[in-house]
Amino acid sequence: MTDAFVLGGVRTPVGRYGGSLSHLRTDDLLGRTMAAACERTSVPLDKIEDIVAGCVNPAHEGMGDIARWSALAAGFPDSVPAITVNRFCASSLSAAISIAHAIRSDEMGIGLACGVESMSRSGWALMKGDRRSCHAGRSSCSTRCGPARAALPTRHSSRATPTSR
């Protein structure tokens, strides 16, 4: 079995609700982060064999597969597949595990694991059975799990450490 390594990663700054990152669509935010991770690790976009992105609320932007839209926004070739996973607050972790499993089983050599949420652009969920107004803010809950981040696991690297088994 082949080891999987993390070449590096990037993340956006932690923002505030309605803050300086709120004007960015989540696909643009993630796309920029994905491209920055590739640039930082000197991996050309066309060398990425698969992209897995974690996102709890992709539908709020009207796009179900935020991984694919982000990859296209970032300039990845159409030939690079991308999929979005939702495991709530473990979505990005599940993305990294999925890429690492594919590398360790020799299905691919290099992949991109990432995730994104934007509280400013996300919807709010009414609590079941709560009759109070959602505008009062007392009957709703945030669905945010974190800022955009990206990591590049790979099969071969002399400058990285193995992922845990």
Image (cartoon, rainbow, N blue to C red):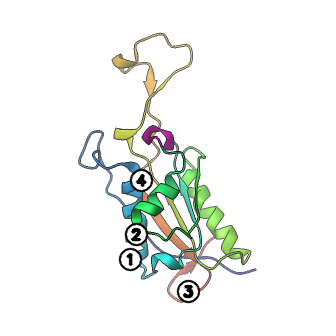
Q: Which mark is residue 39?
A: 1
Amino acid type, label 3: Ser
**Residue drawn at 43 percent across, 79 percent down:** 41
Give the mark nearer the N terminus: 3 vs 4: 4
Mark 2 falls on what kind of element?
A: helix
Q: Which residue is mark 4?
A: 27
- Residue 40 position, x and y percent, is 38, 77
Q: Residues within 10 Å of mark 1 (few under 14, many from 20)?
A: few
- Residue 100 position, x and y percent, is 64, 69
Q: Are marks 1 and 2 in contact (CB under 8 Å)?
A: yes
**Boundaries of the magenta span:** 58-62
Q: Closer to the camera: disc 3 or disc 4?
A: 4
Q: Are marks 3 and 2 in contact (CB under 8 Å)?
A: no
How many angstroms separate mark 1 from mark 2 (CA)? 6 Å
Amino acid type, label 2: Ala
| Direction from residue 158 to residue 119 in the image, left or right | left
Taking the view exactly as shown, the residue that stands out farthest to the bottom is 158
Q: Which residue is mark 3?
A: 157
Q: Which residue is mark 2?
A: 35
Q: Residues within 10 Å of mark 3 (few under 14, many from 20)?
A: some
Amino acid type, label 1: Glu
Mark 4 falls on what kind of element?
A: helix
Residue 161 colored magenta? no
Give the mark nearer the N terminus: 4 vs 1: 4
Give the mark nearer the N terminus: 3 vs 2: 2
Residue 60 colored magenta? yes
How many angstroms separate mark 3 from mark 2 (CA)? 20 Å
- Residue 56 position, x and y percent, is 52, 43
- Residue 60 position, x and y percent, is 45, 38
